[in-house]
Amino acid sequence: MKARHRRFAWIAAGVAVLGVAVALVLNAFQSNLVFFFTPTQVAQKEAPQGRPFRIGGLVEDGSVKRIPNSVEVTFVVTDTAQRVPVVYSGLLPDLFKEGKGVVAQGSLGPDGTFRATEVLAKHDENYMPPEAAAAVEQAHKGKGMSVSTLKESQ
Amino acid sequence: MSLYRYSSPAAFYPLAGMMAPWFAGAALLCTVAGLWIGFGIAPTDFQQGEAYRIIFIHVPSAWMSMFVYLVMGFWSVLALSFNTRLSAMMAQALAPTGAIMTFVALWTGALWGRPTWGTYWAWDARMTSELILLFLYFGVMALRSAIDDPRRADRACAVLTIVGSVNIPIIYFSVQWWNTLHQGASVSLTAAPKMASIMLLGMLVMSFAAWFYAIAVVLWRVQAIILERERGAAWVAELPKLRSAVA
């Protein structure tokens, strides 16, 4: 075995050990690396208790209600299994829509209502012209699915 | 073997000078064509409107930021195991281009995030790991300038680069492994693209532009590095450009 081959083997072994170490560390930190918790996780009390966290899911169809003469808005975040009502007062991002993804930061009240301090829109990775989106929408209407729910169910 | 001839800086220097202008020209052509497709032909997006057009800059630069690091890691492994000077010079030449690509990806991402998500920045796994990539590039460049002896700097930078390469799969798979604000990949090797084909075409042409730009710039930069580090060598003194400059 030549010296340079031995060096190469040591580098390969070093990278492999490092990779395993990082994989184990990331695995241990798994729960701290999530950007948001789903309504199901909240229902199972996996979300942090008594301190702010983020909740993510879809804005339930027909759930967005604006309080007249204020910037307060209420809506329901759902992952189609569980639902969490959210109260927020402030400006919503342009892509905030019923049936679309949302991530809200705030804390869970004792009544089970999530009081959000910040609401972000989470969009999907599909890009197409509006006409194509309308055609896809039309094609799935019979099954009661929209583009976004179709994507979520995959 | 004849290909190994080019592992010598003296032989690679003229080859790099010969190839670079062609890649620069190809980069210019692809940039014009890609921007024309992206901003002139591609339709408006059904949910993001015009804001999605940042994708034509954002995705190519983000891809390049990761790919350049992998190439840098490849040269670092060669430099460390075979002790070849040119490999280390290639790794050195790649770092600034990788850093620029990472910065552009983060910057355009922030400009894209504001109108769509509602925020410039969020500490989700994708964005945080990409920011770490920027610091890795800065770290490699800083380490090199901190060590006076070029051969020791080569080895130190190679080790840091190889260690840092574990970050690349983390960036790429972060959107699959964890809940992130950043959406998943629209284009991957394993699934059909989730984009209209004209949008995809614009993005791919812009990606080729980023490739050709990076190759051209790195070849020119490695020429400068060769000249600087081999300045004592006889063949450098013999270069027509230098002889006329001295005369």
Image (spheres, rainbow, N blue to C red):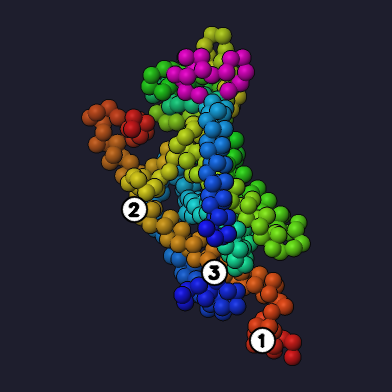
Count of marks overlaid on the render: 3
Q: Amino acid at mark 1?
A: Glu
The residue that appears at 66% across and 70% down in the rendered structure is B225
**Where residue A69 sits in the image (x, y, percent)?**
56, 21
Q: Which residues are magenta?
A: A37-53
Kindly indicate the quadrant of the structure image that contains residue B119: top right
Q: What kind of element bears circle 3? A: helix
Within 10 Å of disc 2 (Cα), the crowding (few <14, some 14-19, many 20+) is few
Measured as percent of width and height from the top left, residue B64 is found at: 52, 55
Q: Which residue is mark 1?
A: B238
Q: Amino acid at mark 2?
A: Ser
**Among the two numbered marks 2 and 3 on one chain, the one whose residue lies closer to the N terminus:** 2
Q: Position of residue A58 (x, y in %)?
A: 43, 27
Question: Which picture quadrant has residue B77?
Answer: bottom right
The residue depicted at 57 percent of the width and 32 percent of the height is A25
User: What SS does tag 1 mark?
Assistant: helix
- Against B134, residue B150 (above or below) is below
For the C terminus of chain B, which image quadrant? bottom right
> Magenta residues: mostly which secondary structure?
loop
**Magenta-colored stretch includes residue A43:** yes
Question: Is residue B21 something that shows in the picture?
Answer: no
Label 2 to label 1: alpha-carbon separation = 52 Å
Q: Which mark is residue B216?
A: 3
Residue A146 point in image, percent of width and height: 32, 32
Q: Amino acid at mark 3?
A: Ala
Marked residue nearer the N-terminal end (3 or 1) = 3
